[in-house]
Image: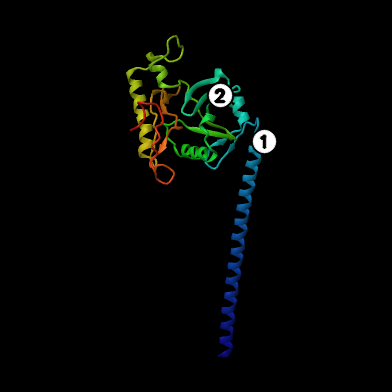
Amino acid sequence: MEEGDDRRKEAIVLVIIVVLAALALVSLLVAFSYYCYITNKLSKRLKNSKRSENSGNSKVQVTTERGIHVFSFKQLHSATGGFGKSYVVGHGGFGSVYRGVLPDGRKIAVKLMDRAGKQGEDEFQMEVELLTRLRSPYLLALLGYCSDHDRKLLVYEFMTNGGLQEHLYPPRGSKGGDASKLDWETRLRIALEAAKGLEYLHEHVSPPVIHRDFKSSNILLDRNFHAKVSDFGLAKIGSDLAGGHVSTRVLGTQGYVAP
């Protein structure tokens, strides 16, 4: 009888030892896997950092965790012909806009922020953060940015047919806009697409975003005359990012500022 009890106890002890050993092995495997994951992540981050420092003329830009590219000033300077006057396509809120071409052939619009605005790094990063959250086929897409000391630039997709204003009210002697291309069906579609852009900002972003400078020059047209709302340098987040207070500064073009 006692011999049977001893064997039963030995069997229980053996089972406990096996279970503990298995748990220890599993714990080691989990710890090792986590170590490999962290090491790999740090290694990628280090490579990206080095690539960013040495990305003078490289065709591949560094991609941030936010899914946009970080360009060097040298790359954008080269893409826009040294920010030459012939490359200027407009003057938006807080800066001039230049057309450019990347080494891979992509056309871009580069917004060189006005230094007089004295926008700090934190404020600039906050604006980039806002822009990366806004994803809609009816909003101009942000492709990347550059922050090089006091030189701050935003890189957007290029819209072949420019602003709606150029087509509605072309300057005399201008070879640009042609109102005859805008039949009533096209105009109605442009109006609806622009309205959908505003609807996205007001209804599908939390907190909502108020554009504050919604006008025909800030409605851009692609090669097929589809519309996208642009120029969010003047945008304001509903009840503001900082502490919930409402800004009382009047920004934008008089007559076009949202009430």
Could you tell me which quadrant the N terminus lies in? bottom right
Q: Nearer the viewer, residue 179 or 235?
A: 235
Q: Residue furthest top?
A: 173
Q: Residue furthest bottom?
A: 1
| Colour mapping | rainbow
Percent position of residue 223, x then y: 45, 21
Mark 2 to mark 1 CA distance (whole Å): 21 Å
- The residue under the point 36% across, 30% down is 257
Asked whether the residues under the numbered discs 2 and 1 touch, taking CB atoms below 8 Å apart as contact, a structural biologist would say no
Question: Is residue 239 visible in this depiction of the protein?
Answer: yes
| Circle 1 residues within 10 Å: few <14, some 14–19, many ≥20 | few
Which structural element holds mark 2? strand
Could you tell me which quadrant the C terminus lies in? top left
- Amino acid carrying mark 1 in the image: Asn
Q: Is residue 196 left or right of residue 20?
A: left
Q: Quadrant of residue 172?
A: top left
Percent position of residue 52, x then y: 63, 38
Q: Quadrant of residue 36?
A: bottom right
Q: Nearer the viewer, residue 24 or 204?
A: 204
Q: Is residue 1 left or right of residue 225?
A: right
Q: Which residue is mark 2?
A: 100
Q: Nearer the viewer, residue 229 or 5?
A: 229
Q: Which mark is residue 54?
A: 1
